[in-house]
């Protein structure tokens, strides 16, 4: 058993053990041998099902409790001293009340179970931007997922011992009772308590809880940004690489864009993946914004992944992958809607597949090491991160939002980012397809008052010497019969090319009240069976609808009272005046 020389850590582990009363304590060393012994144990208990070893070597299926398949935003709290600090964007509970309630849940909850102690590092080991945490959990599924998603075990523990600082995360699956399920954050104490769920974002505490909610809080006081963003490098035929960081809400295309393969017409272009979900952005000494990905793996949406939509992802997940809540074929291969090969016989619940209900859960996920991705960037582990040329925001909107537009300047860009709204998806429990405001795609993840967050974003005009350009995209605009107007996926490269050209030399665009949009010859449509008039339709700005949109957005901003930066309201007024 690994022990630690850090008293703060050993004392905390002892305290938790005496409160939760586990049968055993296992300190994770992060070795491959440990990973495979955990997997073997889960296969024995039925927690994991080994998939076809010839076609999907090293792949396993885990079935969640059917009531525990997505993030639970209504049960997720930020427990700051005052409610105002958490803001109207978060659920809030008084910290001591929240802790009392959680401590009650945790009392004796690990009896008969093993308690796993998981030291982990978010970010490349040894990078000055990386941060450490220790998750204590009674879920072996969490332990194997943390192995793939973070740098965990002995190497992280060494860093924690030499730096002396780490975030504490306490997790138990409890009884998986939705009535006894809460995800609590205590940013002032760098502490997370999560009880009653075994699902990804609720249970893998390094991800949304640490790397976004707690980290955003730290980033605010320390002058950086923790964002729900992919990081991607676009290499042109001349060998120049431009790095973009893009924020889209959950299940709105980050993993797909991060792993994009350019269309055939783009000879000599390459796309490199650095991250698919979270970016930590720091200004460097010269005032350039740089990004690192705190994660080491992908916890990605399975449905819709195939050799046409996302060949890199498809090839990445044919080995050494944990599938959660997918269907299975007669050949014991994983199956999901949109896979396009194979016939399911068993659905995600383990029942016979009838075709009446989805085979895979719409929020079924793959967990896989980022190193398996054929487009994994050679700079993905660079301790100093990569320089960011553009920040791209987007949402899933049937109407209104054009394919792409560019903000006029930084302040307008912050307003555009704050105005992101998107149809809800299966990534969180609740209604699907309802448009809701999701500023910077951070509605579920910002660990403090959005008003302060927007002010923090605005302050970067002072912190950076070269400000990244800000864009908004929408891959999901539909026609009257509900078909997507834009082919999306690899073809999004065409929009990225326009974005990069705008950053470099300001290639042609049309100015509108909401920002710059491409003219109908500005997006390369070679090889696409699409008429240039489609670009007109995709970039059409309906003034009446937009006036209503911005007025509603302004009302939303005003909900944050005195916290709302005046500057954002002024930006709304400017756009409204131009729309009149
Ligand atoms: P999280 O992991 O929840 O943060 O999601 P994400 O933002 O990484 O989304 P992801 O790339 O996994 O895509 C979610 C769903 O949207 C999948 O079913 C994709 O097939 C679909 N999708 C992604 N990109 C596009 C696109 O360009 N066009 C269309 N029509 N669908 C897309
Ligand atoms: C998301 O919902 O944005 C995800 C999956 O990336 S989870 O880890 O559950 O947050
Ligand atoms: Mn996400």
Image (cartoon, rainbow, N blue to C red):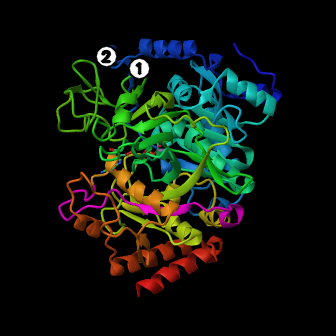
Q: Which mark is residue 52?
A: 2
Residue at the (48%, 60%) spot, across then down: 438
The answer to whether one can see residue 547 in this image is yes
Q: Which of 190 and 523 is in front in this view?
A: 523
Query: Is residue 155 rendered to the left or right of residue 7?
Result: left
Q: Does the residue labelled 2 lie within 8 Å of ligand 1?
A: no
The main secondary structure of the magenta stretch is loop
Foreground mark, 1 or 2, reads 2
Reply yes or no: does residue 433 show up in magenta.
Answer: no
Q: Give the range drawn in magenta.
A: 460-486
The answer to whether one can see residue 68 in this image is no
Circle 1 SS class: loop
Residue at the (67%, 31%) spot, across then down: 125
Query: Is residue 508 rendered to the left or right of residue 351?
Result: right
Query: Is residue 241 rendered to the left or right of residue 165?
Result: left
Kindly identify which residue carries mark 1: 48
Q: Label 2 neighbourhood size at 10 Å, few (<14), some (14-19), many (20+)?
A: some
């Amino acid at each position: 058993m690994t022990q630690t020389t850090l008293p703060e850590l050993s004392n905390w582990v002892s305290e938790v053990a005496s409160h939760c009363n586990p049968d055993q304590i296992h300190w994770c060393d992060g070795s491959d041998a440990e990973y495979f012994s955990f997997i073997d144990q889960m296969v024995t208990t039925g927690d994991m099902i080994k998939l076809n070893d010839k076609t999907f070597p090293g792949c396993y299926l885990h079935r969640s409790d059917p009531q525990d398949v997505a993030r639970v935003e209504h049960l997720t709290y930020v427990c700051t001293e005052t409610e105002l600090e958490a803001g109207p964007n978060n659920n809030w509970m008084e910290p001591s009340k929240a802790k009392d309630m959680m401590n009650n849940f945790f009392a004796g909850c690990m009896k008969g179970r093993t308690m796993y102690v998981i030291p982990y590092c978010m970010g490349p080991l040894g990078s000055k931007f990386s941060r450490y945490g220790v998750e204590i959990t009674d879920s072996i599924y969490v332990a194997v997922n943390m192995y793939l998603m973070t740098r965990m075990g002995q190497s992280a523990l060494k860093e924690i011992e030499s730096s002396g600082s780490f975030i504490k995360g306490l997790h138990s699956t409890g009884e998986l009772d939705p009535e006894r399920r809460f995800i609590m954050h205590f940013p002032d104490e760098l502490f997370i308590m999560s009880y009653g769920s075994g699902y990804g974002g609720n249970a893998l505490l390094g991800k949304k809880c640490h790397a976004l909610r707690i980290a955003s809080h730290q980033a605010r006081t320390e002058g950086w940004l923790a964002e729900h963003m992919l990081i991607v490098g676009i290499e042109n035929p001349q060998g120049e690489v431009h790095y973009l960081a893009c924020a889209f809400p959950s299940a709105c295309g980050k993993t797909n864009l991060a792993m994009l393969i350019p269309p055939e017409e783009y000879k000599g272009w390459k796309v490199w993946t650095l991250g698919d979900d979270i970016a930590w952005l720091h200004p460097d000494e010269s005032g350039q914004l740089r990004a690192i990905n705190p994660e080491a793996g992908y916890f990605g949406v399975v449905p819709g992944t195939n050799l046409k939509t996302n060949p890199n992802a498809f090839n990445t997940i044919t080995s050494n992958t944990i599938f959660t809540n997918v269907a299975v074929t007669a050949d014991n291969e994983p199956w999901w809607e949109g896979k396009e090969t194979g016939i399911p016989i068993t659905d995600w619940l383990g029942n016979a597949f009838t075709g009446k209900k989805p085979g895979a859960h719409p929020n079924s996920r793959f967990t896989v090491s980022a190193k398996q991705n054929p487009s994994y960037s050679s700079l993905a582990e660079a301790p100093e991160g990569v320089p960011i040329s553009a920040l791209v925001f987007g949402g899933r909107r049937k109407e209104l939002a054009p394919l792409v537009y560019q903000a006029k300047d930084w302040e307008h860009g912050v307003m555009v980012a704050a105005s992101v709204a998107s149809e809800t998806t299966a990534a969180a429990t609740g209604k699907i397809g309802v448009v809701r405001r999701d500023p910077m795609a951070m509605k579920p993840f910002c660990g403090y008052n959005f008003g302060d967050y927007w002010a923090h974003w605005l302050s970067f005009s002072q912190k950076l010497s070269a400000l990244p350009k800000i864009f908004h995209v929408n891959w999901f605009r539909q026609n009257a019969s509900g078909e997507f107007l834009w082919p999306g996926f690899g073809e999004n490269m065409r929009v990225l090319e326009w974005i990069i050209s705008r950053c470099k030399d300001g290639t042609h665009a049309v100015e509108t009240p909401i920002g710059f949009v491409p003219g109908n010859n500005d997006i390369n449509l070679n090889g696409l069976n699409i008429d240039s008039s489609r670009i007109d339709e995709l970039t059409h700005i309906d003034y009446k609808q937009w006036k209503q949109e911005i007025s509603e957005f302004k009302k939303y901003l005003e909900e944050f009272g005195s916290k709302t930066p005046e500057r954002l309201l002024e930006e709304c007024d400017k756009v409204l005046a131009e729309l009149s």
